Image: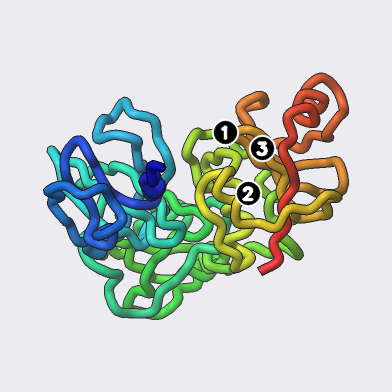
Amino acid sequence: MTVSDPPLPDPRTHAYDPQGGWAEETLRGRLPERDWTWVTARPARAGNARLSLRARPDALAPQVTEALPGEALEVLREEGGWARVRTVGDGYLGWARMEGILPGEAPSGETLTVGALRAHAHAGPKVSQPLVAELCLGARLTRGPGDVVTESGRRWVPVALPDGTGAWVGEGVLSPTQAADVADLALRLLDTPYVWGGRSAWGLDCSGLTGLAYGWAGRTLPRDADQQQALLTPVETPGRGDLAFFPGHVGLMLDGRRMVHANATHMRVTVDTLGEGDYGARLAGSLTGFGRWTR
């Protein structure tokens, strides 16, 4: 009788490269024996712009996910201007350009989280001032020195962007997006463009939408649809806020049949009804199950 080898850790969340012969230190004892070079993760964070994480250290490689401005990262390896990084929030790995990464943890000071779906930072406390950064729901800033400035009835907050650059944001940018439940927030994102690997209101993929909606409600989901399905509790009859799963796809149910999802058929976030019309029929025919958050 042969004893089979234990399955290898998921390479989407565990960093190892059999071809290059390196692996993260936490995988000692979990990989086949060989002369591994062990690497230790060090803290970092995304810079002022959304950071694209790619499947390979190549600008033409597919984007697998993205880190939001100021988001906490771990850097595991550097190679030719690229870094193998992990997003701390959902533990997902990808290759990113070094120039978009800031070393170390966030600076001390009051952390401000962007609450608007999409927003900008300005060079000064006035709407006519130049834009200096593109922001999104969940981006992290630091409170800057000085007082709030009122201009034409608008209140402007001094902030520091992730790289320390001073900027100003309208106070409303920091007010949390209001949503009664995860379905309400997902509906706020209707017509957002479909972007493979996207995680923000500037562009989303299917699991990016569900992860964003759940995350804003304080429920952290894994990055990919199959990982989300494995985490949630299967249910036969879906309710509002449950997730619907298909091969390589996920949507968020609004009721027993209607679903909001980021999809490449319409190339945007839409609402579709399972079993209705040609597309709805195809969705219903490929449905693999529903999942509910019960944690």
Q: CA distance from mark 2 to mark 1?
A: 21 Å
State the residue at coordinates (78%, 27%).
285
Whether residue 124 is visible: no
The residue tagged 3 is 269
Q: The N terminus appears in which quarter of the rendering?
A: top left
**Helix, strand or loop for disc 3:** strand
Q: Cα distance, mark 3 to mark 1?
A: 7 Å
On screen, residue 198 versus residue 130, left or right, reads right
Q: In the figure, is residue 262 to the left or right of 146? A: right
Disc 2 or disc 1, which is closer to the eye?
2
The crowd level at tag 3 (other Cα within 10 Å; few <14, some 14-19, many 20+) is many
Q: Which residue is mark 1?
A: 194
| Colouring chosen for the image of the structure | rainbow
- 3D distance between C-alphas at marks 3 and 2: 20 Å
Residue 98 vs 91, above or below: the answer is: above
Amino acid carrying mark 3 in the image:
Val
Q: Check disc 2 and give the amino acid type.
A: Gln
Task: Give SS at disc 2.
Answer: helix
Which of the two discs, 3 and 2, sits closer to the camera? 2
Residue 247 image position (x, y, % from top left): 63, 33
